[in-house]
Amino acid sequence: MLSPDFVILTAFAYVGLLFILAYLSDARAKRGKSRFLSSPFVYTLSISVYCTSWTFFGAVGTAARDGLEFLAIYLGPTLVFVGWWFILRKLVRISHSQRITSVADLLSSRFGKSNRLAVLVTFIAVVSVTPYIALQLKAITSSIQAVSNATGSNGSHLAGLDEVRLAFGIAAVMAIFTILFGTRNVDAREQHHGVVAAIAFEAAVKLIAFITVGIFVVFGLGGGFGNVYALALEAGVEIHEKAAFGSRWVAILFLASTAVICLPRQFQITVVENSNEEHLRTAGWAFPTYLFLMSVFTFPIALYGLATQPPSSNPDMFILTLPMSAGNEWLALFAFIGGFSSATSMIIVASIALSIMVSNHVIMPIALRRSANLEAAEEHGIARFLLRSRRVSIAVMLFLGFAYFWMAGESDALAPIGLISFAGVAQFLPAMLAALYWRHATVHGAMSGILVGFVIWAWTMFLPSFESSSPLVRQLVAEGPWGITMLRPQALFGMEGVDPLVHSVFWTFLINTVTLVCVSLATNQSALERIQSTLFVDIFRRHPSAQPHILRGSATTDELFFVAERVLGWERAKALFESSDIPRGEAASRLGVSSEFITKLEREMASSIGAASAHVLLSKVVAGDSISLEEMMRIADETQQVIEYSHELEQKSLELRSIAQQLREANTLLEELHRQKDDFLSQVSHEVRTPMTSIRSFSEILLSDDGLSPDQRKRFVSIIHQESVRLTKLLDEILDLSALEHGESDWVNSPIDAEDVLDRAIAICEALARQKSVKVESVSRAKKGPVFANADRLSQVFINIIANAIAHNDHPQPRVEITSWTTKETYVVEICDNGPGIPKQYRKNIFDKFVRANPDDASSPTSGLGLGLNISYNIVKKLNGRLELVDGRLSGACFRITLPLTKIELLDERATETA
Amino acid sequence: MAKPRPAREEDVRRRAEAVLVIQAIGALLLLPPLINLFNTRTLLFGVPLEVLYLFVVWLLLIGCSVIISLRMPKAPESVPVEDQSPAPERRSEGNGG
């Protein structure tokens, strides 16, 4: 039998070893030789702080009492770590980029750097974790008693220590250790190398201890796995599950998965102490493997214990009592050290995590608000204050744990505290998932969700844990407050007959999540929340440099350096300023600083004092003459509106521009038409004036001069006649034109043979041709040209063109060639001459009014009026045909008339001919 | 920056989906009703079947996690780059107090 003195001294020696280890690791890290310390395996081992004494001793006890239920505690984290690529990686990435220091900081930072939320989270964490620390103290004292059988050994003075003093001593030593190695510096983002090394060492110790005991029991005593089960079966121990895996299994699996993310100590080790995201890659499989190894022997040990130990023995201590009853006290001592490691590592990390939360989110904001001269303190003033508050928090936290142990230690209120604690911190999960994945979650939603979840947890789970020690609570659980049975803690709203754990997990999570979602939907995000939510949710999408600038850069370098120095210390502040090329000193004392730098500084400071405090502190300096964030967002909103408005305007003006363009075109057309009309009028007047002048002058001569010879008289009269004929012809043509342009009432189309019309036109021009000795020949002709047209009008076109070809031909051997043919759908006539042709400049507008190919001979009697071709053109157009100037076979002009063939039979041919 | 990106991104997306599927299947195997199919009060190699089943599923999950860890791409900037000032300047400070 080991003496209590010896056991206690061993424990203290072990703690001494931890001190040395931590000290050496810190020293190594300081010299920059921390390669091994920051390896992924050390990281994985330190995550195993998850396995506390509750799992080291308690798992065997749970296995003995409830079968395989203990496995759910390990399988939950396994599932989370297998999926490290999602939640864990995102958490680590965000925490690195935002310099997150704790769970409370994460939630506060995401939800608009709200300090109230951080305080709430801190409070819940303290309430749920402090009993857990008490549980560790309890495990240590009971294991010391178990391994030394301390009852009644009076030989040594150490044995005189009762349980309470022992626990106090342990708490005190742990406090010293944690304060020494856990608060060496204020930057929570900096690795606590000493602590991590100690935790990793402890993780290795507890694993080796447990496996050693397991191998000893299963193979040494039991003779292999199969034999242990057979032995248990023989002794009448139930080796199978008592019932089907049900809701309790599911609830525990769920709680364990949540706890490995939400427990402050897990967050501290997994996320905050993570120095490299890549370490998760190893931890993703190594941590589940650790848990696997940790639980392989648990069930067989429990069964072997149940089969061989007296029924009165405590199954929680089988891991110690089994080696002892086999006479292997050294192994028992080793197992005790294993359990001791798991307890101390939990105490150390949990108190560090809690102290960071308490100092950053409770003490610091109060100090910032209360004392005006905090910034005016000397270098490191804030940092020093923070460290001091952190140390005090650690001491207070451990004392609280001890006090809880002191008061509740004798009752069995401590036993279920592991799961109760899990369920307490699990209330952060909905808000945490919302923080990572739901952009529109608001701080009000997160606050109310967590608060409601916490209240229900306290009512349905925490309170009933005092049932055995307090008659008042017992009555409350049995009858409900004021006899309201609907509010009984373990049968809320009448939900009876459910396992209390399942009952509580169901209600807390249901109401927590529903509240979070509903309140978030009903409330609005502040500007800062909106910015932070994008930073969190889109962490993998966003370019790292695309950080919004929350504080406008209007503070001067000196002011900023002053604040930075208070928090970070002169050396780090200087390094930070120099790395960003921010000049300091006399010359630059009044210079402004870029908002990028302020953002960077805020983040750097957040890693020491938390996001909310850093924001408040910097705002104090910067906000003096800078705009508030809301204002900035409002301006941004206004800018956005102005942009939209101007976009609208732009659209409008574009429309206007296109309308103006149309108008301009219309106007040009109108002007052109107006000009044409003017031209036409002046042309007409001119054309009318010439014959009128000669008629007038000749008639005046005839009137005034009586001595004219009859011959002369006759000649003058004939001139007058000739001119008036020309005048009539002109007026006829104008009338004709106007009729064509404005539509003619007596224009009737009928199916005719265009060949006949052409023949007639040629015959009519025969006289003119003979007079000018022009040879008119039909080169090749179509047999028939059935078109739907007005024969008189078509004939007018042919005559006009043939007459023109004859009249303007000044070739020595003038010739006009007429060709016609039909294609599938058209009838085509070409009339070509070997005259001078149409000069290039007139080719385009030869069909316009009053355009003559040769304007010089306008006054000559042979020249036309310049209306003929225009009339012809309009007629052909009206017949749905085309009149074009083409390059013909002869040297002169060549006009082509194209008309569509008609399908109607020429029934009325005869009638048309006679018409 | 963006060289043979598209193909790789596609790969990453597929693998990430595979991780989700593995996680979901793992959870499914560990939850009722599937788990109760093996809770039949039988012994296999002298060990209760449900115990063997849970540990086998566990080993499979660990195996999958090893594969995931090997095949997921490296983080583009595995260390938060921006302002990790050199180590010597960030030594622990402020022990007084």
Image (cartoon, rainbow, N blue to C red):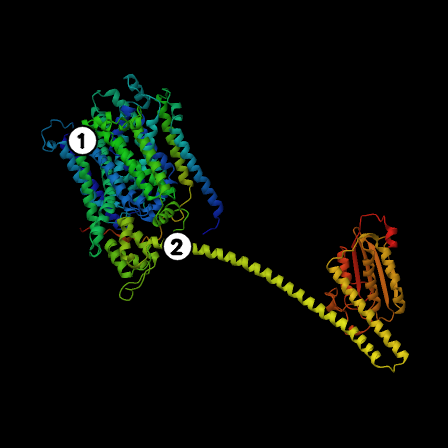
Identified by mark 2, the residue type is Ala
Q: Which image quadrant: the C terminus of chain A? A: bottom right
Q: Which chain carries label 2?
A: A
Please tell me which residue lies in front, A890 or A346.
A890
Disc 1 versus disc 2: nearer the observer:
2
Where, by quadrant of the figure, is residue B72 drawn? Answer: top left
Mark 2: few/some/many CA within 10 Å (<14, 14-19, 20+): few
Give the residue at x 79% y 73%: A691
Identified by mark 1, the residue type is Gly
Does A350 sit above or below residue A725?
above
Where, by quadrant of the figure, is residue A446 drawn? Answer: top left
Residue A339's spot in the image, x, y percent? 23, 33
Residue on which the image places disc 1 = A409
Mark 1: few/some/many CA within 10 Å (<14, 14-19, 20+): some
Whichever of labels 1 and 2 marks the residue nearer the N terminus, that label is 1
Where, by quadrant of the figure, is residue A570 drawn? Answer: bottom left
Does A501 sit above or below residue A882?
above
Residue on which the image places disc 2 = A636
Residue A818's spot in the image, x, y percent? 85, 61
Residue A491's spot in the image, x, y percent? 29, 26
Viewed as shown, does residue B18 lie left or right of A492?
right
